[in-house]
Image (tube, grey):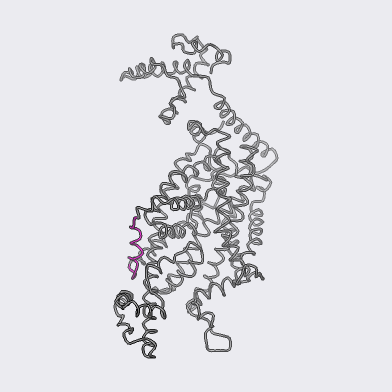
Amino acid sequence: MRSTKEGENEPSKSRASPSDVPQASESNMEESVSWDSKLTDMDSHLGAWEVGMLTWSPSTWIAQAQVSETRMAKAQAWETLALARITLQPKPSVTELATVTTLEQESSELVNRMSRESSEGYPPRQLWASKVEYMLAIMSYLLMPSGVLRFASGWVHKGSCSFFIAYILMLLGIGIPLLFLEMAVGQRAQQSSADMWKNLSPWFGGVGYSMVMVCFITNTYLNVFNSWILFYMSHIFYFVVPWDQCPLQRNSSNFDPECEQATSYTYFWYRKTLKASDRIEDGGQPSFSLGMSLFLSFCLICAFLVNGIKSIGKVLFVLLLVPYSIIVCFLIRTLSMDGAEYGLKHLLILKVASISDLTIWCHAGIQVLFDIGLGFGPIVSLASHVPDFNNCMADAFLMALFKIITLLMTTPFLLSILGFWATTTTHHCCKKNQETLLRLVAQGILPPDAQPPDLSGNPTSNYNSWLSSLPPPLRSAVLSVVPECSVQKQFLKIKDNPRFLFLIFTEVISLLPGSGFWIVLFFLLLLTLGLCSNLMFMLGNVLTLQDTFPFCRRQPRLLIVCVSMAMFLCGLIFIQPSGIYYFSLLSECWVAVPVIIIIICENLAVAWAYGADSPKRWFVFSQSGPRS
C-alpha cells in the first residue's frame, strides 16, 4: 500500500509508468503483489461492475493483449500488470475506507466477544454439523402450509399462469436478493437477529428486537394450527369419523337441527373443534381438548429440539421426506378421479391481459415475501451458525429453486382435489334440485314444463343443458325455488385460510374409496408441514436468546422448555371461543405490516453500514474468507 505522503503527491506523479516505480523492499513488494492478485481474482468475478473504479492506462491494455502462449510470457505479463496496478491504483475513497474499517471492526468485535465468553466459562456457539443439515433447516423453514394454500388460491383467482410469471419475476427481483441479504448478514456477523442489527448500527437496534417479537407471536399462533390437526387426528380412528354425519340430539333419535341446517363438516369444525362464539367480544374459558392438543404440539417441538442443532438435522430429514412422499401418493391418486381434469386445466390458462394488472404483481410480491419467510428472523439465526466463508449466494438460488419445485408439486395436487370436489358437489346439487322440482310439479306449484329430465350419466351437463333450453320466464321461475349449480362457481370458492383445509378437504377425502387410509395420510401431511416450520421458528427464538444471553447456553434444554411454556400460555388466547377471530386478525391482517417494515429497515441498515453504491463491496462482504 502507498503511504499517506505518497497519496498527497501531484496527479501527474500518480500516472507514472511502471519503470518509474521506486524500488521497494522485497517484503513490501510481495505484500503488494499478493494484494493485487486478490484484486485481479475479484475482477474476474465482477466483470463489468469494476468499470470506473480503477484507472487503466493504454500501455496496460497493450501489455495484456500481447501475452504470449508460453507460460513464461504469461508470468511476465502478470508481473507487469501487477506493477502497473501498484502504480496506477487510485487513492481509496472515503466510503471504501469506511467499508474496510467496518469489516475490520466486525472482526475485532467478534474475536473480543468470543474471548470474553470463553473467559467467563460459557459454552461456545454451536455450528451445523454439515452443510446438508443447514440446507435441510432452511428447506423446513420454507414449508409453511399457509403459503402453499395461498399460492394455489392466487393461481386460481389472480390469473393462473399470469400469476405464476409474476411470481417468478418477483422471486428473481426481490425474493432471492433479500434472502441472500439475510443469509449474508447472519453468516458474516456470526450473531443472531437481536444483537446483530444493534452491532451493525445502534440506530437499527430495534430491527432485531422487532424480529424476535414477530417470530415469537407468529410461532405462537401457528402452533395453534398444529393443535387443530392433532385434535382431528384424535378422532380418525373411530369406526365412523364424527365429521361425516351430524350428531344425535340428547335423549332423541333426531339429528341436531343446527347441524342439519349447515353440514356435518361445518358443525364439527365450529362447534366441536373451535367451540366458536358468534362474536369476538364473547369470550370464555379455553377449550380443554384443544388445550391438550396444543400442549402435545409443544411437547413434540421440545422433544425434537432437545439437543439443539446437533440432532435437529436427523429429525428434519424424516420430517421432510414424509410430506413429499405423501404428496406424490395423493397426486397419483387424484389424477384418476372424476373432475380432476377440470382443476388441472387451470394450470394451462394464460390471461395475457392480467399481466399488466398491478394488483397481481402486488399479490405476487407479498406471496414471495411470505413464502421465503423474510423479516421473521430465523434465516439470520440459522445462517449465523455456518462458517463465514460459505457461499450464501448459491444457497439463496438453491432455496428459491427448491421453493418453486415444491409449489409445482403441491399446486396440481390441490387443484385436482378441488376439481373433484367441485364436480362432485355440483352433481349432488343437480340431483337435489331434480328432487325438489319433481315435488313442486307434483304439487302444482310449477307447470309440467318445469319437470327436469333424467340426469343419469353426467348430471351437471344434462341439468344445465335442460335449464338453458327453457324459456326465460320459466327459467326464472325455476331458479327462484332452487339454487344454481355451477362447477366454476364451486371451484372458485377456494380460500387461503386454514379453515378451508378442515372444511373442504375433509369432505373431499371422505368421498374417496378407502377414505380412512387417506384421511390419516392427509392429516399426517399437514402435521409434518406444520412441525417443520414451527421447529425453525422455535429454533430461531432459542438461538437468539442464547446469543443475547450467553448464560442460557449452559442449560439449553431448560431454555427450550421455558420458551415453549411461555408460548403455550400465550396460545391459550387462541383456543378460547373467540380465539379464531384473533387468529384470523393476526394471520390475515397484522403480520404483513411489521414484516414489510422490518424488511425495509434491513435494507437501510445494510446499505448504511456497507454502502449500496458499489456491487464490489457486496461481493467482498458475502465472499470474505475465514477470519484469522
Asked if 208 appears above or below 487 in the picture, the reply is: above
Q: What's the magenta region?
A: 336-350
Residue nearest the viewer, comparing 61 with 167: 167
Asked if 615 appears above or below 77 in the picture, the reply is: below
Residue nearest the viewer, comparing 87 with 553: 87
The image position of residue 492, as x and y in percent, is 41, 65
In the picture, measured across the screen, residue 591 lies left or right of residue 398, that is right
The answer to if 483 sits in the magenta stretch is no
The image position of residue 517, as x and y in percent, is 43, 71
Q: Is residue 555 visible?
A: yes
- Residue displayed at 58% across by 86% down: 250
In the picture, measured across the screen, residue 196 lies left or right of residue 621, that is right
Q: Is residue 309 visible?
A: no
The answer to if 349 sits in the magenta stretch is yes
Residue nearest the viewer, comparing 433 with 530: 433
The image position of residue 314, as x and y in percent, is 50, 53
Quadrant, the C terminus: top right
The image position of residue 408, as x and y in percent, is 39, 55
Q: Main secondary structure of the magenta part?
A: helix
Asked if 596 appears above or below 51 in the picture, the reply is: below
- Residue displayed at 54% across by 84% down: 248
State which quadrant residue 471 falls in: bottom left
Extreme residue in the front direction = 473
- Residue displayed at 33% across by 83% down: 450
